[in-house]
Amino acid sequence: MHKSINIHLGIRLIYYGDKCMVSLRALAPSLTRVTVAGAIGGVLHVGHGDCDLIDAKAVEYSRAVLNQMDIDGEIICCEGPKDNAPAFARREKVGTGNGPEVDFVVDPVDGTTAASKGRKDSISTLACAPRGCFQVLPDDGYYFKVATDYHSYGKLSLDMSVEEIVRTIAMAKNVPLEKFTVIMLDRERHNDILAVLRRLGVKVILIPDGDIIGAILAATPCSGFDLLIGAGAGPEATIAAAAVKCLGGAMLVKVWNPTTDAARMERLQQAGVDGAKTYREDELAKGDELVFLASGVTKGELLEGVRLNSDTATVNSLSMRLPSGTIEKTETTIHFKKHPLYKQFLHEL
């Protein structure tokens, strides 16, 4: 049993028995520090061609911030294991243990390959919710994803063909096909989808990495992007679903090629994933308290990249949260020598 009361300054206090906790709304500014740290750790090795080093430093810096926070946190899923990349451990405990019980899904750098090559659109990102609110989609194989804005909410199904999905969204948005824009990962596994899109005459923007950004752009009205479609990793699907839900958009996710790998399906079933089910954004990120955060590593469509100087770093971040629906963009400048956390990393900065 729990109850909540509102006090001045917009902070909601939640009581679980005799234990008092602040709401996620009050935590959101502190949580931004996590993705800021991930972005700074990741940017140190942009353009060096070493994906693992970028991921490792982003994880190290993010973990250092998380473990200073007064939360009882758990990383329920992190991008990385599929590619044997550095990552948070599954069910890794973070925080001091004193504070709200919250779960995280984390991608320390979404777009690691792009960052390693000095390319655009890499971010450090996470989603946070009260304990038990996220559907775990393990980083084990791929998941088919569709994301768009509020116009098509409740009108889509993954039983539809690609053409039916496109035509349904175009009709709902009153956009002619020749002006309809799809964003999709540039992968060989998408060749059949790409052929359909080309035949329909829509614009297709092929991106090398980062389908979280693609989902956000597709779910944002008047962004110039109408649809994200294609197969990508599981943790990114849950993080993207949190962002899409905050934006009021629609997202559908399903296991990609569920009949081709029996061993994988057994692993997913043990993790609580139904291989035949289509998950909506509000099933991947349940409840009415939710925070999505991203900080730019390299310059991109969504955020500016880190501006790194000899003793400072300036980082641009995006925060979305429910129930308020607030969307904020912020700019943070870290002074390394003065900061109690970053002092320990001065030899790297």
Image (cartoon, rainbow, N blue to C red):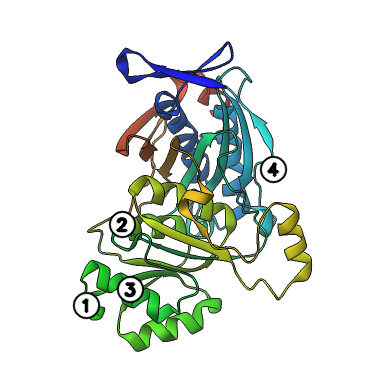
Q: Is residue 145 left or right of residue 200?
A: right
Q: Earlier in the sequence, mark 1 or mark 3?
A: 3
| Residue drawn where x is 45% and y is 37% of the image | 290
Badge 2 marks a residue whose secondary structure is helix
> How would you rate the neighbour count of disc 2 (Cα within 10 Å): few for under 14, some for 14-19, many for 20 or more?
many
Answer above or below: position of 43 versus 71. below
Badge 4 marks a residue whose secondary structure is loop
Q: Earlier in the sequence, mark 2 or mark 4?
A: 4
Location of residue 308 in the rendering, given as x and y in whole percent from the top left corner: 40, 39
- Distance from Cα at disc 2 to Cα at disc 4: 33 Å
> Which quarter shows the N terminus?
top right
- Is any part of residue 120 visible from this angle? no
Q: Which mark is residue 90?
A: 4
- Distance from Cα at disc 3 to Cα at disc 2: 13 Å
Q: Amino acid at mark 2?
A: Tyr
Do tag 4 and tag 1 residues touch (Cβ < 8 Å)? Answer: no
Q: Residue furthest front?
A: 1
Q: Residue furthest top?
A: 18
Q: Give the residue at mark 2.
A: 150
Q: Amino acid at mark 3?
A: Thr
Which dot, 1 or 2, sits closer to the camera? 2
Location of residue 164 in the rendering, given as x and y in whole percent from the top left corner: 38, 79
Q: Amino acid at mark 1?
A: Pro
Answer above or below: position of 91 versus 271. above
